[in-house]
Amino acid sequence: MDGSALTASAAMQNQQLQAHILQQQHQLQQQHLAAQQQQQQMQMQQHHQQMLMQQQMQQQQQMQQHMQEEEAAHATAANTAANASSAGMVSPFECVGGRSSPPMPPAQIFPSAFAAAMAPNAAASAPAGATSGLPMYHGWPASGGWPAASMPAQLASTGFTNTPFGAQANAAAAAAALAPAAPGSPVLHAPPLLGGLSGEPSDATAARAGEELSRTLRPFTQWEIDPRELTYGPRIGVGSFGEVYKGMWRGTEVAIKRFMEQRLSPATVREFRSEVSLMASLRHPNIVLFLGAVVQPSGMAIVTQFMPRGSLFRLLHRNKIDLDPRRRLTIARDIARGMHYLHSCSPPVVHRDLKSPNLLVDKDWTIKVCDFGLSRVKGATFLTARSQGGTPEWMAPEILRNERSDEKSDVYSYGVILYELATGEEPWGHLQNPMVVVGAVGFNHQRLELPDDLQPELRQLVSECWHEQPSARPSFGEVLDRLSELGEIKSSPSRRSAQQAEAAQNA
């Protein structure tokens, strides 16, 4: 082999060696980049956890300060409880036709009374794990709800606990509920029972709760249903409060939300009274119709109209129904009309748990808003967020941060429902842990990804509903005006193709 050939061979080997070195360098760079991204993700998760811990500490400090301020107001509660008469009980507030609510009666129940009564149990530890939003039928979870033995840390920080109520704590809760209200207090309903109570109350607790039930529900006798007139059919839902059945009442199909007898406590009675008083005052084509209630301590129940098609969540995400574009728009309008009615009440009613599982569909495809267990009447300014509930996938960032909120929080949730109608996808369905949603939306300002081929007008409306500042979000009156300009809500072609491919693969 001559010199030129050797030179050419050496040059080729040199080039191959350099290419191999470059390839190794590229691989090292990729590995280094992947390591950096993993480290950033870990740092972000640690940051979210630190923010949540700081929020919990702040809420605990605020609660302690608030309870100290109210200590004087509740000092004589135990003495006045026995002398409370039915004249002091709250009657259903007026919400039909925009009439104002009556003056605040002395026995109006405040969230602070419940929190103060639960303070001795606040030190009980609560695991951070909890189930995410479950598919729901007729507005209540098909199974579970918050597990009886677990509760998110941000709920535990507000003073709620899963430990059983002792007789003394229940007596204190009932006495605090009947205490005279502090002057100038905002009109708020008692917080719902979150997470479920484990164990059974004592005989003294059950007796006191029964007495309180009899007293507090006297103004609602016009809505009382004789339990002998109810025929129970199949169970269609279960939650921490009890169970939901399909049933019959005077020849009419109804849904019966029955509270478990062993969970009867002053807190359960207050929750029951709050929901009955609210639902009894609401009458609108897009609000589920309240028919009456069983007010006997042995079987408290709320009876509403039965919606044969179930929830919008089930239709979209379980049955995978491909809705017509005009029907999507009709559904969006129905929801907006129902919410506009609630927000137009005097004072406004804030739902606080607006989501597709709480939207029921009748045989004519009319949508009705349901499940007012977490709803509140807005006071002079804002609602406090001391009793947090709902499902993180639909909740506004200010609620996830446990900040003050108003009716614009419902507008944020409505934007998530528009996303479901346009894409057919579950919000944050790829995330298994709801606490990740809390960190992403509440603290990292992330939003659901909108498809590129989404209608520009709809994209703009959803983006405005998701604005970080609640005051910048549109009202439901403005939403209705914007929907009238759409004509239809088209399904995203790219998302529809992906869903069809998934359906074909599962077939």
Image: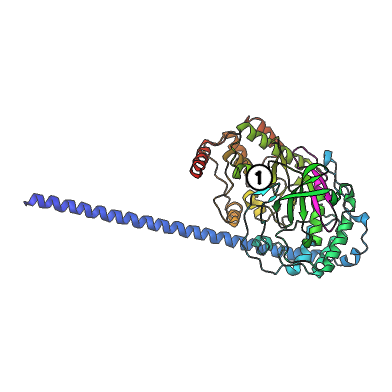
Label 1 sits on a secondary structure element that is helix
- Relative placement, left or right, of 38 versus 315 is left
- Span of residues in magenta: 277-302
Q: Which residue is disc 1 drawn over?
A: 356
| Residue 425 position (above or below residue 263) | above
Q: 372 or 181: nearer the eye?
A: 372
Q: Amino acid at mark 1?
A: Ser
Q: Is residue 380 visible in this depiction of the protein? A: no
Residue 46 occupies which quadrant of the picture? bottom right
* Overall secondary structure of the magenta section: loop
Q: Is residue 302 visible in this depiction of the protein? A: yes
Q: 494 or 199: nearer the eye?
A: 199
Residue that appears at 54% across and 50% down: 430
**Residue 341: where, in percent of width, then height?**
76, 39
- Relative placement, left or right, of 306 versus 501 is right
Total marks shown come to 1
Residue that appears at 52% across and 35% down: 493
Residue located farthest toward the left when viewing the structure as drawn: 2
**Residue 219: where, in percent of width, then height?**
89, 51
Mark 1 Cα within 10 Å, few/some/many (few <14, many 20+)? Answer: many
Query: Magenta span has 293?
Result: yes
Q: 423 or 19: nearer the eye?
A: 423
**Residue 475: where, in percent of width, then height?**
70, 40
| Residue 294 position (above or below residue 205) | above
**Residue 445: where, in percent of width, then height?**
58, 50
Query: Magenta span has 32?
Result: no
Q: 100 or 205: nearer the eye?
A: 205
